[in-house]
Image (tube, helix red, strand yellow):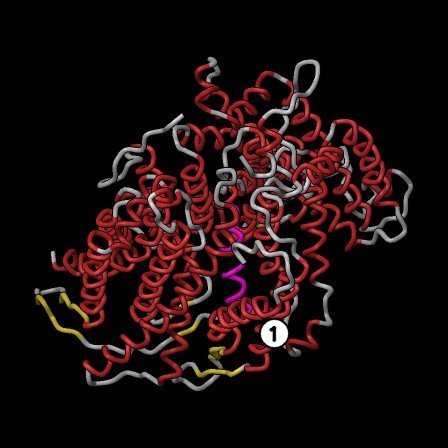
């Protein structure tokens, strides 16, 4: 039971990271109906920018939690900005010229961008893994059984709380601001939105920037949680986050978060109880099963095919 | 840049736009090009390496590039690009007449290739590699180009073919010629197994599912150590023999039987002709299949699935046959790969392989058989050429490895190709068969991604 509880905590932490990446997929798919295959690599770039910023500021393990969190918020802001520029540039150069082209064209470009980003980072930063010492260490014991101690680390709390805060802010953005209204309008009917005076190009660009910024936060979290990154982390994290987006229902923001949690839990529990080597197989099989039996996802609406 | 309607020379605007592009590039490059994290320090981990000159060069390159684009690129007139001219050129290449004229020439060249004076072992190896990719490209072309189903996990079938030869020969002692059809059948079976559940999925969902499938196969190959050897792979796979004559120095070998002097090149030449024969077989089979009703059904499926269904075409069978036949050729190629390398490991079957094959098909123009040949030569030959670019070391320092750049350029080429010609170099989407004369259908408009 205690073991189960510990895995539950770990799964929720991992799921939060996946959920943040999944938002980028689900928003982009919702608006322009393409899978932004390079999104996982923007997440990876975000992790690298965070790492570099942390080294520049010389942030190391500190005893003062408040100071540590303050510094990390600064790091997060910087990597959000840089990743946002990446997201904007990718959309502007690689996807916008192909809007209205045949269906598979943007997906193929996206694969090209993904390969490009991975190898750009590999060429400039080196292929070796980058380790980072824990910045926020420590935690407390939740439950002490006779055989197993359940611990929550401060890092895990930070991840879950930060995800929750970002999600709340983001939900507000979508439901209440004019940008959110424009996004929802583009999602429903892009041509009509144009006729009503919405700058569709700008709305789509903003969507990419927001998605990339959230992915950068996820990258920072991944870096702090695992303490090691390389240029290849974006690939499998990207597919899992996409699975989360599909599972939750593409286009649905609460769905992306829910899907992220489910995928995180599946991965952690599968690794804990069955085999850690096959945990990716579990997540990928989940994707196949969901797409076959529940293509509209948990919280999505069924897609109607128009002729 | 977006609405550049004025025709007069606008230097200030040009400089402004170039400056903006440079600022963006500076932000993009600052943490990647400009700062490098190095782990060679003490125990305490990482420190930063500053590379301002590289950063400055990157930004300067962007500025100059943007200026050049502003100066020489024609102002975009909405959708009025000279697509007609370009497609006339492409049509000439892709027309059946040209194909009929060029294909025999290519074939003669391919047959003569091993006997040319410069054909040493290295050149022949590249030749074998290129033909393998041409064959894989033709196989995937059935799925992607004809049936319009984007398959990102094609390498899984390649892996099935390679491992089935490796395992069948290890456990049952089967020879190459026995394993070749078995590998094809097994791969086709896997194609059906994968194809059956994903039939209902739309284009990009299908792409992701096939990608996941490819990764699942790779992870299983990597972790099922007792069966597949795990990351060590399977080695000492028997090499194919020439009708029972092995390529060795012994009296019963190929060289001794034909009274030739033994040379290790003989085996390579044999492998070259083997893959050439397999590829030619693929060429004829896929070429014929296009003209059969099933081939027309594939093309119809690509154009409009709903119309297809309402005309009474069984889309389930059509899709499954595309998957199975495409997979079968992947299996053949895989079994050849295992025989050539005498060693298979999961690392040979990662996602990059799938992306390479897909890129060959896409750049070759989706449904042009000749296009696949040209793009495979350009792609694989280009990657090999990059290994020779030693002068780059002068720019990037002595510890720079130019082959690192090859995948970077590969990704860049993929993006630029799609932007320049979304339908590939040799781009036609005109049906393979038509009544009496060819009509200009909307496909001609769509062929350049417009419409």
Question: Would you place residue B69 above or below residue B219 in this image?
Answer: below
Question: Would you place residue B150 above or below residue B385 in this image?
Answer: above
- For the N terminus of chain B, the quadrant is bottom right
Left or right side of A79 for B71: right
Residue visible at 74% across and 42% down in the picture: B271
As rendered, which of B188 and B314 lies closer to the eye? B314
Which image quarter: residue B71? bottom right
Counting from the top left corner in percent of width and height, residue B236 is at 62, 49
Label 1 Cα crowd, 10 Å radius (few <14 / some 14-19 / many 20+)? some
Residue visible at 33% across and 37% down in the picture: A291
Residue A125 in view of the camera: no
Counting from the top left corner in percent of width and height, residue B380 is at 68, 51
Q: Which residues are magenta?
A: A108-125
Counting from the top left corner in percent of width and height, residue B28 is at 48, 69
Name the residue tied to disc 1. Answer: B60
Counting from the top left corner in percent of width and height, residue B447 is at 60, 35
Q: Chain of mark 1?
A: B
Q: Main secondary structure of the magenta part?
A: helix
As rendered, which of A283 and B301 lies closer to the eye? B301
Residue B370 in view of the camera: yes
Residue visible at 71% across and 37% down in the picture: B90
Please say whether residue A110 is one of the residues in the magenta stretch: yes
Please say whether residue B397 is one of the residues in the magenta stretch: no
């Amino acid at each position: 039971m205690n073991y189960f509880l510990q895995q539950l905590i770990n799964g929720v932490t991992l799921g939060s990271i996946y959920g943040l990446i999944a938002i980028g997929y689900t928003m982009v798919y919702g608006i322009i109906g393409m899978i932004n295959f390079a999104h996982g690599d923007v997440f990876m770039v975000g992790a690298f920018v965070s790492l570099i910023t942390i080294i520049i500021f010389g942030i190391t393990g500190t005893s003062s939690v408040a100071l540590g969190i303050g510094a990390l918020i600064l790091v997060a802001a910087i990597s959000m900005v840089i990743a946002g520029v990446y997201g904007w540039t990718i959309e502007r150069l690689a996807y916008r010229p192909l809007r209205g082209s045949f269906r598979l064209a943007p997906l193929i470009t996206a694969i090209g961008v993904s390969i490009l980003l991975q190898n750009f980072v590999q060429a400039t930063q080196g292929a070796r893994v980058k380790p980072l010492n824990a910045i926020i260490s420590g935690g407390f014991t939740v439950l002490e059984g006779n055989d197993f101690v359940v611990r929550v680390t401060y890092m895990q709390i930070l991840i879950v709380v930060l995800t929750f805060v970002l999600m709340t802010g983001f939900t507000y953005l979508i439901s209440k601001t004019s940008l959110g209204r424009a996004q929802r309008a583009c999602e429903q009917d892009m041509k009509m939105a144009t006729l009503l005076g919405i700058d569709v190009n700008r709305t789509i660009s903003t969507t990419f920037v927001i998605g990339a910024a959230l992915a950068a936060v996820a990258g920072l979290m991944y870096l702090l949680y695992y303490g090691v990154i390389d240029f290849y982390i974006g690939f499998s994290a990207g597919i899992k986050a996409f699975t989360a987006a599909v599972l939750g229902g593409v286009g649905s923001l609460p769905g992306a978060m829910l899907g992220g949690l489910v995928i995180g839990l599946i991965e952690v529990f599968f690794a804990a109880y069955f085999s850690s080597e096959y945990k990716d197989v579990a997540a990928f099989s989940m994707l196949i099963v969901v797409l076959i039996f529940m293509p509209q996802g948990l919280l999505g609406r069924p897609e109607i095919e128009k002729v | 840049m977006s609405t550049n309607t004025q025709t007069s020379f606008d230097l200030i605007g040009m400089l402004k736009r170039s400056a903006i592009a440079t600022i963006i590039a500076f932000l993009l490059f600052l943490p990647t090009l400009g700062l490098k994290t190095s782990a060679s320090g003490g125990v305490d981990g990482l420190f930063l390496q500053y590379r301002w000159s590289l950063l400055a060069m990157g930004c300067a390159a962007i500025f100059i590039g943007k200026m050049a684009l502003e100066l020489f690129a024609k102002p975009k007139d909405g959708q009025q690009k000279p697509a007609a001219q370009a497609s006339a050129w492409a049509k000439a290449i892709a027309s059946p007449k040209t194909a009929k004229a060029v294909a025999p020439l290519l074939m003669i060249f391919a047959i003569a290739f091993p006997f040319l004076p410069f054909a040493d072992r290295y050149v022949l190896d590249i030749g074998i590699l290129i033909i393998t990719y041409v064959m894989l490209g033709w196989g995937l072309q059935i799925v992607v180009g004809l049936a319009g189903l984007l398959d990102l996990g094609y390498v899984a079938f390649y892996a099935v073919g390679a491992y089935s030869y490796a395992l069948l020969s290890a456990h049952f002692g089967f020879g190459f010629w026995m394993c070749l059809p078995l590998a094809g059948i097994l791969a086709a079976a896997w194609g059906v197994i994968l194809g059956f559940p994903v039939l209902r999925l739309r284009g990009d969902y299908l792409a992701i599912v096939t990608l996941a499938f490819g990764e699942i196969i790779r992870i299983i190959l990597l972790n099922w150590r007792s069966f597949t050897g795990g990351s060590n792979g399977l080695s000492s796979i028997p090499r194919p023999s020439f009708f029972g004559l092995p390529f060795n120095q012994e009296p019963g070998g190929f060289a001794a039987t034909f009274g030739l002097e033994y040379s290790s090149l003989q085996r390579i030449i044999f492998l070259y002709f083997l893959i050439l024969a397999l590829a030619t077989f693929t060429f004829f089979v896929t070429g014929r299949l296009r003209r059969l009703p099933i081939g027309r059904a594939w093309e119809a499926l690509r154009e409009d699935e709903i119309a297809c269904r309402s005309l009474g075409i069984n889309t389930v069978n059509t899709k499954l046959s595309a998957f199975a036949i495409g997979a079968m050729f992947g299996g053949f190629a895989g079994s050849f790969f295992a025989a050539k390398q005498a060693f298979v490991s999961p690392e040979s079957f990662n996602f990059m392989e799938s992306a390479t094959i897909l890129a060959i098909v896409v750049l070759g123009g989706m449904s042009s058989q000749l296009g696949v040949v040209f793009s495979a030569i350009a792609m694989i030959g280009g990657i090999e050429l990059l290994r020779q670019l030693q002068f780059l070391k002068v720019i990037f320092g002595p510890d720079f490895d130019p082959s690192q750049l090859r995948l970077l350029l590969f990704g860049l080429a993929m993006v630029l190709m799609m932007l320049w010609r979304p339908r590939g170099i040799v781009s036609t989407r005109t049906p393979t068969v038509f009544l009496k004369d060819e009509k200009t259908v909307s496909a001609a408009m769509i062929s350049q991604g417009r419409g």
